[in-house]
């Protein structure tokens, strides 16, 4: 079964549905593939818990748009979704979702030019800029560039310190 709740398409969703209680169970059903119009399975998942998990563990799970929401891209898809998943609606297992997807954090996505500009910063500016970066890979790119262009030891030390902090965070 594929987990195809959200398709990459240039269409905006007409309607979105979610599990009525996103923290406690997994739902599967049918939907139309928005590109081919063929029936496909969908899965609204819930991460596995250890056998010794308690009810409190279930309630600590946070909402995840990617795991808990199905996006539908046409009126036909909506009609077919409701028809094919009557049981889910009749039992109150699914409900309409009127929120928006979470914004994807792209603060760690830097072009080569941006990496070079950061590597060339003064220690004070570099320290401030590194506060916004929380990716080991991004810091490694900046560090490699700084070493390549022969930046002073103070700059390299700041970058290594940030990298060490990130490595020990995970």
Image: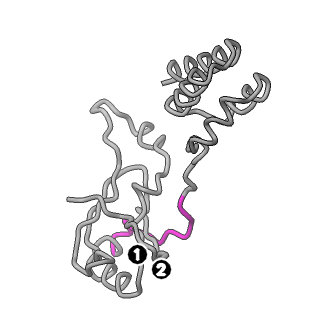
Horizontally, residue 162 falls left or right of residue 52, namely right
Horizontally, residue 138 falls left or right of residue 119, namely left
Report the residue at 57% width, 45% height from top. Answer: 111
Q: Is residue 25 above or below residue 160?
A: below
Q: Position of residue 140 (x, y in %)?
A: 52, 27
Q: CA distance from mark 1 to mark 2?
A: 6 Å
Pick whichever, 150 or 26, lies toward us: 150
Report the residue at 41% width, 83% height from top. Answer: 74
Q: Residue furthest right?
A: 124
Q: Position of residue 120 (x, y in %)?
A: 70, 29
Pick whichever, 35 or 29, lies toward us: 35
Residue 124 visible, this orientation = yes
Q: Main structural element of the magenta stretch: helix, strand or loop?
A: loop
Q: Is residue 7 above or below residue 167?
A: below
N-terminal label among 1 and 2:
2
Pick whichever, 149 or 138, lies toward us: 149
Determine whether label 1 and label 2 are within 8 Å by CB. Answer: yes
Q: Position of residue 160 (x, y in %)?
A: 59, 17
Q: Is residue 10 above or below residue 57?
A: below
Give the label on residue 72, or none. Answer: 1
Q: Is 92 colored magenta in this rendering?
A: yes
Q: Residues within 10 Å of mark 1 (few under 14, many from 20)?
A: many
Give the label on residue 14, or none. Answer: 2
Give the label on residue 38, or none. Answer: none
Residue 86 visible, this orientation = no
Element marked by disc 2: loop
Residue 163, image quadrant? top right
Q: Is residue 114 above or below residue 43?
A: above
Which residue range is magenta in the image?
Answer: 90-101
Element marked by disc 1: strand
């Amino acid at each position: 079964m594929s987990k195809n709740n959200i398709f990459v398409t240039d269409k905006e969703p007409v309607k979105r549905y979610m599990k009525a209680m996103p923290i406690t169970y997994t739902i599967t059903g049918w939907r139309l593939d928005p590109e081919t119009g063929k029936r496909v399975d969908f899965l609204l998942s819930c991460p596995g818990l250890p056998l010794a998990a308690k009810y409190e563990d279930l309630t600590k799970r946070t909402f995840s748009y990617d795991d808990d929401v199905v996006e539908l891209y046409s009126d036909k898809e909506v009609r077919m979704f409701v028809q094919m998943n009557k049981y889910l609606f009749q039992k109150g297992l699914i409900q309409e979702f009127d929120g928006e997807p979470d914004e994807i954090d792209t603060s760690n996505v830097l072009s080569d030019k941006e990496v070079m500009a950061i590597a060339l910063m003064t220690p004070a500016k570099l320290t401030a800029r590194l506060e916004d970066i929380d990716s080991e890979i991004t810091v490694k790119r900046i560090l490699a560039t700084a070493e390549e262009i022969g930046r002073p030891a103070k700059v390299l030390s700041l970058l290594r310190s940030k990298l060490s902090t990130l490595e020990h965070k995970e």
